[in-house]
Image (tube, rainbow, N blue to C red):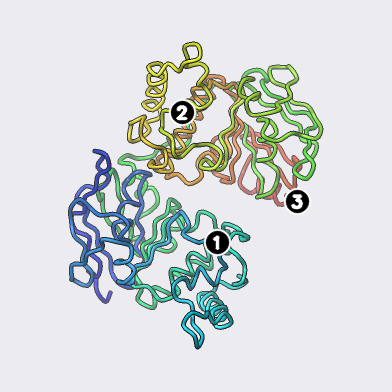
Amino acid sequence: MANPDFLQMRAISKSYDGTQALREVDFSATIGEVHAIVGENGAGKTTLIKILAGALRPDAGRILLAGQPVDLSTPHDAFNLGIRTVYQEFSLIPHLTVTENILLGQMPRGRLSWWVDWARAHRRADEILQGIGFTGIHVRTPISRMSVSLQQMVEIAKAVAERPTILILDEPSAVLSQEELRLLFALIRKLKQESTLILYISHRLDEVFEVADRITVLRDGEVVGTVDSQATNESDLIGMMVGRTLDQIYPTRDMPPGEEILAVKNLSREGAFTDVSFSLARGEILGLFGLVGSGRTQLARCIFGAELPTSGTIYLDGEVIRPRSPHYAVLAGIALLTEDRKRDGLVLSCSVRDNSSLVTMQRMGRGIFLDRQKQHALVQSKVQELDIRPAKIERLVRTLSGGNQQKVVLAKWLLAEAKVLILDEPTRGVDVATKVEIYHIIGDLADKGVGILLISSELPEILGMSDRALVFREGRLVGEFSRSLASEESLLASAAGVVH
């Protein structure tokens, strides 16, 4: 490689409120390589790239580019040095068009300095998109009218509009389809050939092995090691990430399900799903699989009272229930961990303590007053049980990693002591180690008699966790598979409507 030491980050340290996020991290990468950074949620990946992007100041350490020390006090400093970052959270301006977002601050001017040459601006934005292979995006469309996946494509186009020296991609594939991901990988390979250094952060190890030349593993704010992607495998990499061998990703469960706890009979919601019937037993994990738009989430919301069915009946413990609201469902003993934890599951500006006790405040009171001592003890017990890090219940939830935020949502529902727990994509956006923890929590809940409805788009998760699997297609229940008969091929064929 042309310059093996182009980027050097030496002895980088950073702490937040007494918690050490990075501890004397040494990291180096070269021009013209794709270098992946992996680790559990909370390992320090985001902190490291924010320091390189000028968004955070390190407590100690220095950064060198091409052997020269650089001061990255602000994002503007990083920008001037050719460092571009695509974060998980978009930086687009919703009411502006694709053109305006891509060319923000660089709009071509007409003969008068205050006049924007819109025709030339739209042509330039379109040229940028076409040049990087992102076709089919209409440059005059406001960002607010675009899907999340197309917004991600625009975010990436904005970052590479002027060829960067270093491109940082933080979980870029989380919202992309397979075709969009293929286009992204093609762009990465093109930039690599043009001598751009790409830093790629992802929980999806299959992507890491497909695109990266080298992989650096962080654990608890320290570098565990850097390996060539061709000289390692997924199992070894996971072992480096979590500090132990993952012999058993999915929990072993020997207890058979009990009697029926939940039954759905001929349930329908106009425009979402039609004539759905199934039952769930105590201690059973029932998987729900289907392609996007198959109706699984709408079904879960109807059972939880967030949406109302147009017909059909729901039974809980043999009694008819009509959940008219989530509050009614919670009182009846039904809980829903939502697909979008940030929008529907958490109040990001509140503490771990208050988020964990959102649905159980009434049980923590003395008359009309909240018993803070009781609340503290109950929440602290769940923080320890779920290993939420850092273990500070006054910490604002928005400062936690994605995996720890998901654990806070789980803590909320564990405190509610639900009879039926509906989990909608419970491991989306969390790292491998946290996934394993969540799987074992789910298994423990089932062993205690909780009936669990597991909605997931990940086939290995459905197959590894479920006692039975139901398959949805276009709003209808089209297949049921026992654990012994379920396979990736059979579930996918059923979901796609292919005769198998």
Image position, residue 338 (x, y; %)? 57, 38
Instruction: Classify 10 Å Cα crowding around label 2: few (below 14), some (14-19), many (20 and above).
Output: many
Is 473 placed above or below 49 here? Answer: above
Give the SS element for disc 2.
helix
Residue 181 has which mark? none
Q: Which residue is mark 2?
A: 356
Marks 1 and 2, Cα distance to the nearest angstrom?
A: 32 Å
Image position, residue 383 (x, y; %)? 38, 28
The mark nearer the N terminus, 2 or 3, is: 2
Which residue appears at 72% of the width and 40% of the height?
479
Residue 151 has which mark? 1
Q: Which residue is mark 3?
A: 499
Marks 2 and 3, Cα distance to the nearest angstrom?
A: 45 Å
Task: Check disc 3 and give the amino acid type.
Answer: Val
Asked whether 482 or 160 is in front, the reply is: 160
- Eye-nearest disc, 3 or 1: 1
Residue situated furthest bottom in the rendering: 111
Marks 3 and 1, Cα distance to the nearest angstrom?
A: 36 Å
The mark nearer the N terminus, 1 or 2, is: 1
Task: Check disc 1 and give the amino acid type.
Answer: Gln
Image position, residue 174 (x, y; %)? 50, 54
Asked whether 194 or 205 is in front, the reply is: 194
Asked whether 355 or 176 is in front, the reply is: 355
Q: Contact, CB < 8 Å: mark 2 with mark 3?
A: no
Task: Check disc 2 and give the amino acid type.
Answer: Ser
Q: Is residue 312 left or right of residue 323?
A: right
Any part of residue 27 in sight: yes
